[in-house]
Amino acid sequence: MKAGVNAVKTPDTPLAERMRPQTLDEYCGQRHLMEEGAPLRILIEAGRVPSCILYGPPGVGKTTLVRLIARRTGRTLLEINAVTAKVAELRELVEEARRLKAMGGGVSALAFVDELYHFNSSQQNALLPSVEKGDLILIGTTTENPRYEINKTLLSRMIVFDLKPLSAPEILPLLRRALTDRERGLGGLEVEAEDSVLLSVAEMSGGDVRQALTRLEAGASFTAAAGGAVLTGEALARTVGGAVVRFDRQGDDHYSIISAMIKSIRGSDPDAAVYWLTRLLAGGEDIRFICRRILISAAEDIGLADPMALPVAAAAVYAADMTGLPEARIILSEAVIYLASAPKSNSAYLAVVRAGSEIEKGELQPVPHHLKPDGSGYLYPHDDPRHWLPQQYMEKPRRYYYPGELGYEQQIGSRLRRFWRRFSEENQKDGWKDGEKKT
């Protein structure tokens, strides 16, 4: 554990550390929390910050915000990192917070726990009494969703503030300031840059301010060392490479981006579907996870409107598994475009959901005698020229499947209407409608 202090910054200190905002007005991004009149800004200015969790991806200003809170409220800041901290250090932090409160006339210190989710359940619970009594104000930062990673008992005593990746226009003013600031920034290098170049740095950072400043520092330093005075796009490309692809295979991105791909397929937008597929692949997503979702989409969202959708998806999955990356991306792209462009029907999905719903309610029909292996009276459909004979296949006939009106299902519906009276009735039953998902 250490008390938060302003460390001495030298020219070798990374630019991102040197340029940390010193006041709330210098803080960039997170307008939903920090602009004038926003909830967290009001609480900070009133000095009444609650125990809270700052949740967001790397480089969006979580640690900076904690230090600004301590400076603005005048509270002592005690820092600990959950990745490296031992139990003894955690106890020391709690005791120090109690001592400071007793000596400070009842004013609680801020206990900053970086990457709080790394604490195990017992370590998190050790903080509960102090948070509950107000012996300290706990501020935890985390890149993992606290709603899943933090103990419910501790979470119930804290407020979660969601921090978002910064947009390029939000990062741009900070890059301008960093390039010209002679005290904390790169002003001493005498390097200039057009706003278009700085905007490119911001766009390639993936919403990560730390990454943007690191790229700017590398590009400007390269330019100065080479005797140049203007940072160009070419210099950036030579020093910092391509854009950052923000993606966490174990976190929210894993679910958000695959969800976007599936919904783009369902919405018949092949361009969006390919984009999200490429984002998954660029982020290093498990190719078999992607393949499983493509197979599910083929059956659930295209279904019998195009019976070839599932064979195409299955063939693509097999071919991608046999080929491997990078070539497999072409195969998966073909499958995703086919699915997105195909007619859509979720009738097969809805049919099995309807049947499952009735079974869960106790609709357990006995098998008709003539359908049993040892039964009698079964009529063999192929004995009829139509390859169909009127025959009862359930003790109480039920309607679960409602053919869609697109693609091949038009033919399916027409055929079934010729065979079964119930398929000639109105295409609706018990509040279920074709294309409607019951939740």
Image: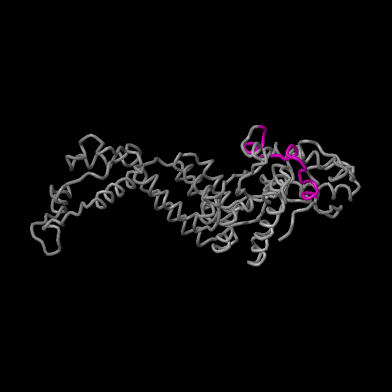
Magenta span of residues: 15-36
Q: Is residue 358 visible?
A: yes
Q: Is residue 239 magenta?
A: no
Q: Position of residue 325 (x, y in %)?
A: 57, 58
Q: Position of residue 22 (x, y in %)?
A: 78, 43
**Number of marks:** 0
Q: Position of residue 321 (x, y in %)?
A: 50, 61
Left or right: residue 402 compared with residue 386 = right
Left or right: residue 256 compared with residue 112 = left
Is residue 428 shown above or below 208?
above
Question: Residue shown at 64%/32% (left/top)?
Answer: 37
Left or right: residue 415 compared with residue 149 = left
Left or right: residue 210 compared with residue 33 = right
Q: In this view, which residue lies farthest toward the top?
A: 37
The quadrant in which the N terminus is found is: bottom right
Q: In this view, which residue lies farthest toward the left?
A: 377
Question: Residue shown at 73%/59% (left/top)?
Answer: 2
329 and 177: which is toward the camera: 177
311 and 199: which is toward the camera: 199
Rendering colour mode:
one colour
Is residue 147 shown above or below 181?
below
Q: In this view, which residue lies farthest toward the right?
A: 227
Q: Is residue 326 visible?
A: no
Q: Is residue 32 magenta?
A: yes
Q: Position of residue 174 (x, y in %)?
A: 76, 40
359 and 142: which is toward the camera: 142
The quadrant in which the C terminus is found is: top left
Where is residue 196, by image quadrant? Answer: top right
